[in-house]
Image (cartoon, rainbow, N blue to C red):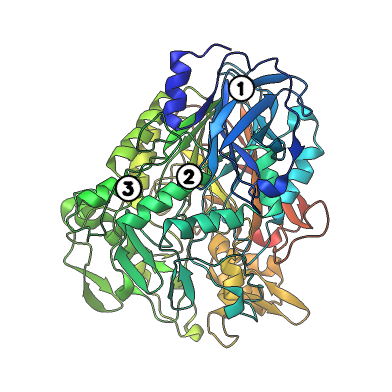
Amino acid sequence: MRLTRRTFLVASALGASLAAAPGWAGREARQAVERRDLFPQGVASGDPDPDSVILWTRRPPVGGSSARTLVVEVASDPRFRRIVAGGRATIGAETDWTSRFLATGLEPAREYWYRFIDEHGFASRTGRTLTAPAPDDGAPVRFTFASCQSPNDSALNAYRRMIFEDEARPPEEQLQFVLHLGDFIYEVTWYGSEHPDGFRGRRIRDLYRFPDGEKVGAFHLPVSLEDYRTLYRSYLEDPDLQDARARWPFVCVWDNHEFAWAGYQSQYVAPGVSRPSQRKKVIANQAWWEFIPARVARPGDPTQDRFDGPQVDDVPIGAFDEDGLGQEPNNLAAIHSLLIHRTLRYGRHVELLLTDHHSFRSPPPDGSAFSVPGTRWVSAEKVDRVLDGGRTYNAGQSPETIAFLGRELPNPAKDGPRQTFLGRTQRQWLLDRLAASTATWKIWGHSFGTLDLRSDYFNLPASTGVQWPAELGYALSNNSFHHERGEIFDFVRERGITGLALVAGDRHAFQSGLVSKSLPPETFEPVGVEFVTGSISQSTLLEVAEGVRKDDPLRALYLCDRPDGPPLPAMNVAFLHGVRSALALQDNGGDLQAALALRNPEVAPHLRFLDRGGHGYGHVIAGEGQLEVEFVGIARPMERAESADGGPINYRVRHRTALWRPGEAPTLALEVREGDARFCV
């Protein structure tokens, strides 16, 4: 195997050791004894391309046994009879004993096995990985997408289900990779000893303790690199997550919790705290880089396998430019310390476009004065549009005040920037890549999605005691960045770009539908399709709603209580069909057909599916003229399932969309293939 200049430069940019030393192919496998206990976080692979893939492990000192050098073996068979690549990697405390190794010179669309062996002859478990197909390969691309996991208060049964089903498929139909859309860890945590009775029916484990953390309210928060490393180490000891990472390459982006619950740029925001945290942003990035194998741009000497982050101070961000980017030098250094936006090509049919939605996000305006009394988890559409537009709203004539419930309240966004989750540079990069892509399907890995969820609260009956004037517009749930989304979707429509599909997470809910700049009564022009996966394990809004008091006037909007079973998910009905249907569900004893007789067809013409209590993952097959996405919804994962299949399935819902031509609107068909999803469509 020849070490080319191109291969050397690619590996150096990744900060990975290089599996391209001459003479490795054809060698005999080393004699080794598998010792999984010495590699407690297992093995992983990431970001494959047609001729290379990053391999990962962690070999810390354990019980008096330590190592400094690892041999990597890559084989075309699981018994390592045919070695095709290999090399050596050094490890040390500066990267928490983790190693990234770029295996090169591989063949496209091939299955490989790999392992790490220390200088004592102790081996990791064997990992399996797959390279990407060549750019001209016309075979369908198959992958799953997932997000939002926390083994500290739940079980990761979805991965066991994923593995169980994949092992049963013929080889040509098996998955090629897993796309993880963020919240790989949760930096806000509880300790089990402080919650012996659990929380919302969930048992809180004591999987870890922060060595340096702080407690704010009920939550423990990380403050040091060792704290963030502690989270990754603990999560990666979960057997189902570890098995998944050993079976498939993962392609990962972060969402919010890899740094801060509600943070933006380098500002750490969580319940009870909001402070400049440039140092924490850098160390959070470092911990992600150490534990997630990915082709990302990081600082320091590109020939060394370590993260040399910038030296920064925690300084108020201060002045923001017209896009809301904080110009304080420490902020800029921190948010550029790791750049994760990138593309990956999979044959003729798929180009993955991956973006970062928090490092360049604008500071949110304070809309707390605009909450409608008696409501939860929603905001007023007309107010949101003003706040989102900032100084650019109404062609630069943003109002001094906003009319709200008979009062004129100061507009807190009048002099602020238009809201962005991408930032100017990353947004332009995305538009350029969309325009240049020749793939059949341009799949945007969007950490939180763009589908509007809205309900007609202006139709609430007076008997609820809640007043929602029609001039407030719809009640919005989890909707934001209206103007930036509009700019992107206008670009797609004007350029005649087809095959745009978004896959997303974060919402702890399954959602699917057509994406458009606006909804009725404004112009509704779909330009793509979107699929949002339920969480792997994190609690859902439906679960939270179960804690709403039964005498709450709007409880029936969230849950339909029954005397002979668990509540029905009325909140799905409210956002699919309107408040009259949701309330009628309770009035008619859960009779869905009676409730749908009162549906408002204007509420959600774009939605095809909504389950705000959904756990599981999405399964994608992207081919020549059709995209197929299946939602696999599993039972609420309170404890680890005992069965090999990961436990029962609630439903299996398949979506199909045919490739549309420029100027045409996409369509999206849905089929419930298994289980009960009546209250989700």
Picture coordinates of residue 347 (x, y %)?
A: 58, 22
Picture coordinates of residue 650 (x, y %)?
A: 74, 58
Left/right placement of residue 24 relative to residue 187 reads right
Lower position in the chain sequence, tag 3 or tag 1: 1
Lower position in the chain sequence, tag 3 or tag 2: 2
Residue picked out by circle 1 = 133
Lower position in the chain sequence, tag 2 or tag 1: 2
Disc 3 versus disc 2: distance between alpha carbons? Answer: 20 Å
Picture coordinates of residue 93 (x, y %)?
A: 49, 47
Looking at the image, which residue is at 23% across and 57% down? 390
Comparing 254 with 570, the one in front is 254
Residue picked out by circle 2 = 95
Asked if residue 263 is positioned above or below residue 160 in the image, the reply reads: below
Q: Which one is in front in this view, the residue at disc 2 or the one at disc 1?
A: 2
Looking at the image, which residue is at 80% across and 35% down? 169
Residue 273, quarter of picture: bottom left
Label 2: which secondary element: helix
- Which amino acid is tagged 3? Ile
Disc 3 versus disc 1: distance between alpha carbons? Answer: 33 Å
Residue picked out by circle 3 = 335
| Disc 1: CA contacts within 10 A as few (<14), some (14-19) or many (>=20) | many
